[in-house]
Structure formats: C-alpha cells, structure tokens
Image: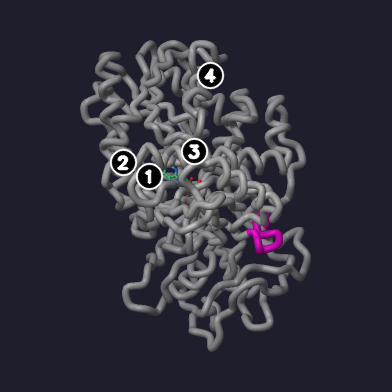
Amino acid sequence: MAREMVVVIDFGGQYNQLVARRVRECNVYCEIYSYRTPLNEILEKNPKGIILTGGPNSVYEEGAATCGKELFETGIPVLGLCYGAQLMSHVLGGEVKKAQNREYGKTETFFDTSSVLFEGLPEKNIVWMSHFDYISKLAPGFKSVAHTDNTPVAAAENTEKNLYAIQFHPEVLHTENGTKMLYNFVRKVCGCAGDWKMDSFVETAIKEIREKVGSGKVLCALSGGVDSSVAAVLLSKAVGKQLTCVFVDHGLLRKNEGDEVEAVFGPDGPYELNFIRVNAQERYYSKLAGVEEPERKRKIIGEEFIRVFEEEAKKIGAVDYLVQGTIYPDVVESGLGGESAVIKSHHNVGGLPEHVDFKEIIEPLRDLFKDEVRKAGLELGIPDYLVFRQPFPGPGLGIRIIGEVTAEKVRMVQEADAIYREEVEKASGKAVAYKDGKNPGPIADWQPDQYFAALTNMRSVGVMGDERTYDYAIALRGVKTIDFMTAEAANIPWDVLQTVMSRIINEVRGVNRVFYDLTSKPPGTIEME
Ligand code: XMP
C-alpha cells in the first residue's frame, strides 16, 4: 500500500518501539529498521522523515552503532533522539563528551519556542533525560534550541538542512508535551498529512484481502485472543465462508474460554465463517510432561500447535492462504525489525507449518501495534468486551505455570485466575459495564491493564482447619501499562487482594498461599516465563 511513511532507525535503545508508537499517534505510519540497514534500502521506502533512536553506546567508543554522513545529506528531514542526537553531532563535526554526572529522570528544560519542534509549547517543561554523554560543541550550522541547568544543548537544529536533535526522550510519557514535539517534526517539518487512520486501514485491508484472495480458500488459526479475533473478523468480512477458522483448545486456556470462543465464532455466533474446534488438551499435557525450561515449553506449545493445525488442514485439503494474527511488536521483538534481541520467542512468528498445503501467508495485522489492533476491531464492529479483552499469550497458561505443566496445575491456575478476574472486575466496575456490550465508562484508577494468576513452582507449609498442608503458591500479577513494553504493578486495593486471597485459598484445592507480584517491567517481564 502506498502511504506516507517515516522511518525509525533503531540504535538499540529501550524506547524504540515507543518512538514508533508515538509517531503513529500523530496519524503517521512508520516502520523500525536496524541502523545496519543500508541507506539505499531505507531510501527505497521513500520516507518523508527519519528518526534516529537512543542506544546504549557512546558515539566515540570503538564499535559503537553508527551511520554514515550521507544519511544527513539526502534532504530528508532527520530527527536524532538521545544517542541519535549525539551521533548526528558527532558525525557532522560537533563534539560529544562524557559528563561528570549522569543527567537522569524528570528534568526542567527551557525551550526556544521559535523552533518548529517546540512550537505551541510552554517555554519551560519537564522532560525525561537519561544520558551520561552530552553535546559539548555543536556541529557547524546548528544552534541550540533547548537547555537545562546542566546541559547547554538539550536540543539543536540546523533548519537549512532540516536536521534536528533532541537529547531527551520525547517518546516517554514523563516528558510533558513529548508527543507534540514528535507531531511538530513529522507533521510540520516532514510535511506528513497524517493519513494513517484505522477506518481507512480497515477499508483498505478488506479491499486488499479481497483482491488477493479472489475466490481462494483461506485458513486461519484462531486463538480467541484479541489479535487473532480481529484478524479472523477482518477476513470473515472480506471473504465470508471462504474462510475456515481452526481453534485449537490446547488445554492452556483460561477457565471456560474454549466455550466462550465457540459461542462467538461458532455457528451460533454473528460471523460468517467455517469454525472448527479441536480439543487437544491430552496431547499437549503429554508433550509437556516433565518439561520445565521456559523456552522449551514455548517451543513445544508452538510446535504442537503447528502439528495439530496441520492435521486439521490436511482434512480440509489444499488452501490458498494461511492467516496469522502477528502484530508489529511480535515482528520487532523476534529480531525481524529493529535491533531488539530475541527476549522471548513469540510462537506466532517464525514457526510455520511445513506440511500445510498453502500458497501464501496473510498477516493482516503485521503493521499494527496492539492499541491499533483494538481500534481496528472497533471499526469492524466487534463488541467492546472482545476488543478490550486483556491480551492472552499464545502459549497460554503454559507460561503462567512455572516449571512442569500438568492437568492438575492447569486446573489450579484456571480457578485462581477466574476468581481474581471476577473480584477485580466486580470491584472496578468493569465487568458490569462490559456485560451490556457498552463502553466500560469510568473504571477505577487502579484497574490493571493486564491481570492474571500464575502458579509458582513453590510449595510451602500451611495450616487449614486443624491440618497441616503442603501446597502450591499462587502469584497474582496486575500491571498498568500503555504498550506492554514497560509496565508497573497496579495499586490494587488491599481489601480486593484480601478477598481474592481468601477465596483462592478456600476454593482452589492444592493452593495454600497467595503472593502479589510487585515487579515492574523492566527488569521483569509481564508474564512469568
Ligand atoms: P512480556 O511477558 O513479554 O509480555 O512482558 C508482554 C505482553 O505480551 C504477551 N505475551 C505474549 N503474547 N505470545 C503472545 O501472543 C507470546 O509468546 C507472549 N509472551 C508474552 C503478554 O501477555 C503481555 O501482554
């Protein structure tokens, strides 16, 4: 699809996806590429602007991530952020030095509001700084347009060449008006019109799918999660009964979820498609018996999914297209875009069925961030309660049971999780609002964006009635997050946690202790494995 685009060049910093997210919030499509990508490949994308991200190196270090001078000579506007800002100065003849003290955290910054970057902003504003190195001498042609008490160059510009540098992180929410600065760059400096909107995405996607698929047969693996549900509805709207959805119940779903998915996508649901449910619980449990290592578990779950799916596909016969609910963070985190290391293998990327007879893969959501998937879901008329359902990982409860997975442990975590969700939703008002399919409306401030129970591998001694117990501990996770890249433990009221604890211990056989996980991400991840 021809659309205006900004390229984000990734130098390995932790906020790189956030930069892309914020640019998309300005209704400008953007993609992330590694700094190793040759310049001619970047130029082939025909970008209207280029943003250089932060990174862990110092520009003067040997082997530091770098770029050629030519990047700044194409006439395309470039904005360097943090490391990207220092690199721009370094490469263009300025000077970058290590400061005596690191400038870190919320920092009062003074802006030259005549700079287009800071147009419409107050002259003083809090920003998020995180740097040791600083620009000690500007490159020729640049002038400083922001400073702090410690840094003479918190931002610089060379308007003649359309080059801009920001030392802090406008992409982080702690930076007041940060998105406005990025907006000023992509919309005012780069001249993007802002054509990236979800209504046009849906319309175009349906049209493109129809053109591509023609009268062909399409096969879709439906997990019941937000991503695959949105993908399935998109396909169903595009090609109706040419679509067959295979829903593998791997026995690692939340309590009652298999039946709920069937109610929506099955023959009694509102959508036109062929729906096949495979009950593969026993198969999964026997494959997972005795396996403790998280990455192996993920691999087994992913591979087994492919096997089950292949068997179903064989029964259907040759299909033309295979749909996957891959989204953009999956692509980036799997090391296929940007610089991010493979932190966890996401089972919906990479592993493809070898023995399914299909011509091509369709990944209709491959370019979207999670919140964009939700917006697309709403555009498609999918009920709110489905669209706003919290994300559930492909490997399911398999990665919420630490260590070996057994049917018995699945039961414990399912029951504990159902209680936890029920109590949180009751206390925050969310479930009530969702029941009528209405917008959730105002919900409690503490309402976590993702919350679930996990089963630790720890057993401990307790006493129930007069008897000594030696049972498992449940860990409750509840996080506040915007993009699932960073997260903080949600401040769930003590009385809610107490109710959940006592219900779990009383109602879930085999559990005698409940913990609340306070770890933020980073350094933790949201899931336990
Ligand atoms: P982590 O644990 O990486 O989770 O902090 C971030 C978000 O991603 C979800 N997640 C997954 N989703 N396949 C998925 O489809 C996976 O393998 C997977 N691992 C984590 C997790 O639930 C959270 O929302």
Disc 1 CB within 8 Å of nearest ligand 1 atom: yes
Do the residues under discs 3 and 2 have CB atoms within 8 angstroms? no
Q: Secondary structure at mark 3?
A: helix
Which residue, given by chain and number where applicable, does mark 3 sit on? Answer: 414
Residue 123 position, x and y percent, is: 77, 69
Q: Is mark 2 within 8 Å of ligand 1?
A: no
Mark pair 3, 2: CA separation: 29 Å
Would you name the residue on which mark 1 appears? 346
Q: CA distance from mark 4 to mark 1?
A: 27 Å
Residue 47 rendering spot, x and y as whole percentages = 48, 48
Tell me if residue 419 is in the magenta stretch. no
Spatial CA span between label 4 and label 3: 19 Å
* x and y, in percent, of residue 225 in the image: 49, 33
Amino acid type shown at disc 1: His
Quadrant position of residue 274: top left
Between tags 3 and 2, which lies in front?
Answer: 3
Circles 4 and 1 in contact, beta carbons < 8 Å = no
Q: Answer whether labels 1 and 2 touch (C-beta < 8 Å).
A: yes
Question: Most extreme residue toward the left, as rendered?
Answer: 355
How many numbered discs, if any?
Answer: 4
**Disc 4 secondary structure class:** helix
Query: How many residues crowd around disc 3 within 10 Å: few (fewer than 14), some, or many (20 or more)?
Result: many
Region in magenta: 173-180
Distance between the alpha carbons at the discs numbered 1 and 3: 22 Å
Residue 350 badge: 2
Quarter occupied by residue 516: bottom right
Dot 1 surroundings within 10 Å: few (below 14), some, or many (20 or more)?
many
Nearer the observer: mark 4 or 3; the answer is: 3
Viewed as shown, does residue 127 lie left or right of 136? Answer: right
Report the residue marked by disc 4.
Answer: 263
Q: Earlier in the sequence, mark 4 or mark 3?
A: 4
